[in-house]
Amino acid sequence: MKKIVVIPGDGIGKEITDSAVEVLKKVDEKFKLDLEFETYDAGGTAYDKFGLPLPDETLDACKKADAVLFGAVGGNKWDNVKAELRPERAILGLRKGLGLYANLRPVKVATALVKNSPLKPELVDGVDLVIVRELVGGIYFGDRCESEIKNGVERAWDLENYSVPEVDRIAKLAFETAKIRRGKLTSVDKANVLATSRLWRRTITKLAENYQDVELNHLYVDNCAMQLCVNPKQFDVIVTGNLFGDILSDEAAVIGGSIGLMPSASIGELTSLYEPIHGSAPDIAGKGIANPMGTILSAAMLLRYSLHAEEAAKAIESAIDKTLAEGYRTADIYSEGFKKIGTAEATEKIIKNLQ
């Protein structure tokens, strides 16, 4: 039995995770994967029930699971909650508690959606890259001060730091990922300004000596942001730190035309967590119009990386490609001439195309 913990979270989280679980159950019937699902709270929903964004019960269940399927957290309902109790602390707590040290975000543009991209079709057609983002270090987890008085004025600060072992660990995963793809790795930093980036660059350059079959190059983060817009097809695997990875992965996601289509995998020491890259979208929650494809594709990554069920993962990806090729579009990717569908119907079409 393979135990999957499902954390719907907030906003549209329940709708999209329900869709992904439906697809996984159908795949389970077909491929005999022996899946078992348990649902737990996190985020604003958990705060409302328990006064905490990440209850111990949820974290404990995740530690024992074969994989975690996560929806989304947050919403303006909790804007005035103390910083340490905000819904977003749930995902940070899961990253720390489960040792989720790396986030993998594939960006592969479906042929049927090339025209949906804000970039010219000739720039987008053929884009196939992966961003490997360090998740448990850097400025997001460094020391911080919310408020202090210095020289008579209020200030706040956050500390950015990385150690050699932290950089080594994420870089090894990135090199190994590049080895099984096209053999090209781009490391992104700001070594012309930041001391942490200079350590990052030195460490990765030294590690590259062990990967002679991978071509390594370095880009400053501002240049990389520009290159993702003007020539995204040059990239195979990009590796970077927590803050830069947060920004660049969202930028890369819109190359495909909608963040509703983009999955992610957070690889951990105890287990791994899978989630779409978009937020909780409270403005459309309950309307039945959310795009479930990013979450369903995250479920495909769950099958591939945690359960090593490659055939089942490819079946889901092919079913989504077929659904899009048939002209079905959720509201976020709809344009005139296509068939608009909601969350439930999109899920039904994908399940039908699994057959």
Image (spheres, grey):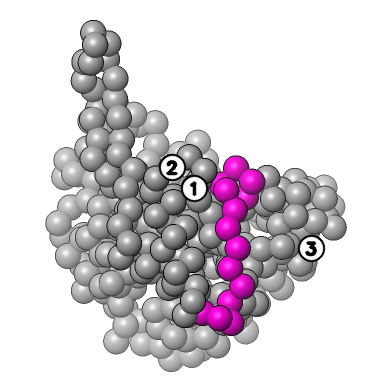
- Residue 347: percent from the left, percent from the top? 57, 65
Determine crowd level at label 1: few under 14, some 14-19, many 20+ residues with C-alpha closer than 10 A.
Answer: some
Q: Residue at x 39, y 55 (%)?
A: 199
| 302 vs 43: above or below | below
Between tags 1 and 3, which lies in front?
1
Residues rendered magenta in the picture: 211-224
| 27 vs 262: above or below | below
The label on residue 112 is: none
Q: Amino acid at mark 1?
A: Ala
Label 2 sits on residue: 194
The label on residue 191 is: 1
- Give me the C-alpha separation between circle 2 and circle 3: 35 Å
The label on residue 125 is: 3
Q: Is residue 91 visible?
A: no
Q: Amino acid at mark 3?
A: Asp
Magenta stretch contains residue 219: yes
Q: Amino acid at mark 2?
A: Leu
Point out the residue furthest to the bottom here: 32
Q: Are marks 1 and 2 in contact (CB under 8 Å)?
A: yes
